[in-house]
Image (cartoon, helix red, strand yellow):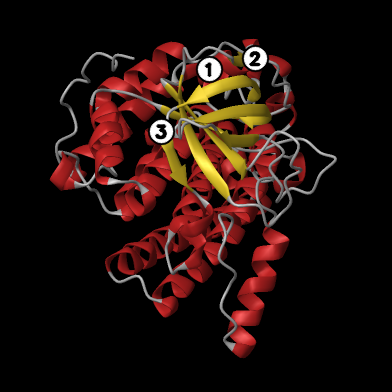
Amino acid sequence: MSAPAAAAAVVVTAADAVAVAHRLSNEFAAEASARDADRTLPHAQVQTLKESGLLTLSVPAEFGGVEAPYEVVTEVFRAIAHADPSLAQIPHSHYTFLEAIRLKGTAAQKAFFYDVVLGGGLLANAQSERGPHPIDVDATTLTETESGDYVLAGRKFYSTGALFADWVIVRASVVDGPGEAPTSSTPKALAFVPRDAPGLQIVDDWDGMGQRTTASGTVTLDDVAVPAEHVVPFSPIFSEPTTYGAQAQVLHAAIDVGIATGALEEGLRQAAKARPHFEARVDDAAEDPTVIQLAGELVVTVRGARALLAEAAREVDAARANPTAETTAAASIAVAVAKVAAVRASLDASAALFDLGGTRSASASGNLSRYWRDARTHTLHDPVRWKIQHVGRHALSGTPPPRHGQI
């Protein structure tokens, strides 16, 4: 399979990345509401992301990438989510799988897939499944053949970005034969499958109330042939201290903070157009003391979440540079704290924008509900009630968080 056409060399340094992300955020915001309302999939916008070079940020410098710190990567995600949270979520797994390659890929796999990404390629996710089996069991199987290659079979859901991808990355249980039933202890691997592989089908059946244009639908795998050189071990990632889970989670937090900053900005815009309540005895809603109080509280909440996001990203960068049991645990806890704050900020800001804007802000034509719908849908990822448990145990007894992809 040939790689996509080379991406424009826009992003060269980490500083470039932030500037480009902010410029694209303004561009993407222009029609974000219309895309959500009509469920118009952002094919053109994803292509712009590919051509911008933003998808190459985590490629190591020795392979020609920017190797930007995660403090930069999280700001890129926040800026895009500020404009369109669906669009920001599409490349989330792209970065996660690049980290899997960095940690467990062979030299040849790194050279090949980093080159795909530097050429503008997008990696997307086919990980989650629907029940009835437990969430930590992958019923999708990867079976080794006599030749040493593999056959991939199963069904995935919530496959964010797969419709836009050049390569679909499938997490599967590695089994000895078709009759073996996977369990939570069955070793897992990542199968890198080109978008046009025979037996791979991507169905656009995502019907979420929010994140409507992520195309997070179904992927079916009907005995897909996978060469051994396209399989990367997954389970061993968690046998040693890494920031794999923290990196994935800090990007989710960045999306939530982006929703929060976007909703707050919109709420303040709506307040400027609202009529004041008669009991306030003022000419503008912005002079109403109850509106002032609400705006001030929201600014504190959102700025606090944004600051915790930056702090967590710095902890991730420190742990990546020196991955010990202590540093990676500290990074995971910092990210968990940031994620809790980000979830709260996104839900608070997206709900309160209606209080700031008044009745007119509930107009269906304004589509301001998209902020809350995106926040409520995205914050269902990786329940924060468990993150609070890990934070509390760590604070009280120094218990390190578990090693998996959600902490």
- The image shows residue 371 at horizontal and vertical percentages of 62, 33
Total label count?
A: 3
Q: Which residue is mark 3?
A: 230
Q: Residue furthest bottom?
A: 397
- C-alpha separation, residue under disc 1 versus residue under disc 2: 8 Å
First in sequence: mark 1 or mark 2? 1
**Mark 3: amino acid:** His
- Are circles 1 and 2 on residues that touch, CB within 8 Å? yes
Question: Which residue is rendered at x = 44% and y = 54% of the image?
Answer: 247
Nearer the observer, 178 or 77: 178
The secondary element bearing badge 3 is classed as helix
Can the viewer see residue 372? yes
Q: Residue furthest front?
A: 146
First in sequence: mark 1 or mark 3? 1
- Are circles 2 and 3 on residues that touch, CB within 8 Å? no
**Mark 2: amino acid:** Asp
Instruction: Report the side of 313 relative to 176 (left or right).
Output: left
The secondary element bearing badge 2 is classed as loop
Q: Residues within 10 Å of mark 3 (few under 14, many from 20)?
A: some
Can the viewer see residue 78? no
**Mark 1: amino acid:** Leu
Q: Which residue is mark 2?
A: 204
- C-alpha separation, residue under disc 1 versus residue under disc 3: 20 Å
The secondary element bearing badge 1 is classed as helix
